Image (cartoon, grey):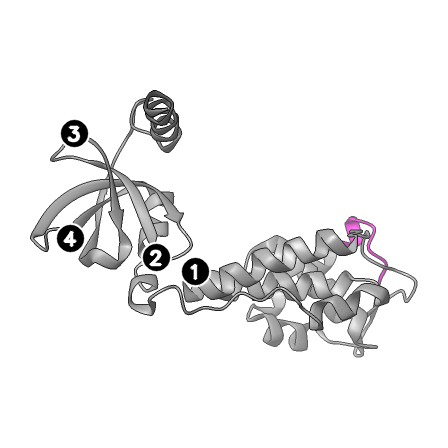
């Protein structure tokens, strides 16, 4: 858990418990008591009104509230739609993170908007994405972030198998399938690969360094220029 997330969770625990000990918070957040003590000190220095009683535990001034994030109903529906899309059409890890984000939003919503969370009229069914393909997404996302090469075992449109060494640059979701844009070492050019045609992939320890003509931004600009020429 990131430190900022942990501090947020500590404040939430203090707000929902009359008294809570460092040990109890450490167990809830899967960190050491020493980490909790350090976090409590940092929160106090940040003007969070924490009350400490030796042998009893911690509490927080009942008048304290987190700085408000104010949404109108349409803004909240837009956020919920995005969260539900991630939950339905992404991989399990991102889906779990989206759920956590939604829980944080729920904690700070005023009463008149709470019903929006439970009475959704816009639904996002999950039948469009094959679960087998989504299992590959976490490794691909990690390789993109860390700039690691991928050895790709891929089935082409003609059903022939191909092995490529690629530099993953970005993922696209097209409403039914996921694709990956990458720089292909064999073709020395951009290529787009459907995730559901990947037979196997291996994220390599080898990193890659792109120049200005080997980036996702450049790929998108190039794609736009090609579209204009076709018009």
Determine which residue is flagged by label 3.
Answer: 188
- State how far apart marks 4 and 3 are (Cα): 17 Å
Gap in angstroms between the C-alphas marked 4 and 2: 15 Å
Q: Secondary structure at mark 4?
A: strand
Q: Residue at x 38, y 46 (%)?
A: 172
Q: Which residues are magenta?
A: 42-51
Which of disc 3 and disc 1 is earlier in sequence?
A: 1
Q: Residues within 10 Å of mark 4 (few under 14, many from 20)?
A: many
Q: Is residue 58 visible?
A: no
Instruction: Say how many tags the image has.
Output: 4
Q: Which of disc 1 and disc 2 is earlier in sequence?
A: 1
Whether residue 6 is situated above or below residue 145 in the rendered picture: below
Residue at (83% x, 63% y) in the render: 110
Rounded to the nearest whole Å, what is the CA distance between mark 2 and mark 1?
Answer: 8 Å
Mark 2, residue position: 137
Q: Is residue 48 magenta?
A: yes
Question: Alpha-carbon distance for marks 3 and 2?
Answer: 24 Å
Q: Position of residue 30 (x, y in %)?
A: 55, 71
* Residue with the mark numbered 4: 154
Quarter the C terminus occupies: top left
For residue 3, above or below residue 57: above
In contact (CB < 8 Å): disc 1 and disc 3: no
- Circles 2 and 1: CB atoms closer than 8 Å: yes
């Amino acid at each position: 858990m990131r430190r900022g997330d942990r501090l947020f969770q500590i404040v939430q625990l203090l707000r929902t418990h009359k008294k809570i000990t460092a040990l109890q918070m450490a167990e809830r957040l899967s960190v050491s008591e020493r980490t909790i003590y350090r976090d409590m000190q940092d929160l106090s220095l940040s003007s969070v009104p924490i009350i400490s009683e030796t042998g009893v535990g911690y509490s927080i001034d009942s008048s304290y509230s987190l700085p408000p994030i104010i949404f109108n109903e349409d803004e909240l529906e837009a956020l919920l739609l995005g969260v539900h899309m991630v939950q339905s059409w992404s991989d399990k890890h991102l889906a779990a993170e989206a759920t956590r984000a939604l829980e944080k939003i729920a904690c700070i919503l005023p009463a008149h908007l709470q019903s929006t969370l439970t009475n959704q009229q816009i639904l996002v069914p999950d039948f469009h994405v094959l679960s087998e393909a989504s299992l590959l997404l976490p490794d691909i996302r990690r390789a993109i972030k860390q700039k690691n090469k991928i050895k790709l075992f891929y089935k082409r449109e003609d059903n022939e198998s191909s092995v490529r060494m690629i530099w993953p640059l970005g993922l696209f979701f097209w409403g039914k399938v996921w694709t990956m844009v990458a720089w292909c070492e064999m073709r020395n050019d951009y290529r787009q690969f459907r995730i559901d045609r990947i037979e196997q992939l291996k994220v390599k320890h080898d990193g890659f360094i792109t120049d200005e003509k080997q980036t996702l931004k450049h790929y998108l600009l190039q794609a736009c220029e090609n579209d204009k020429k076709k018009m």
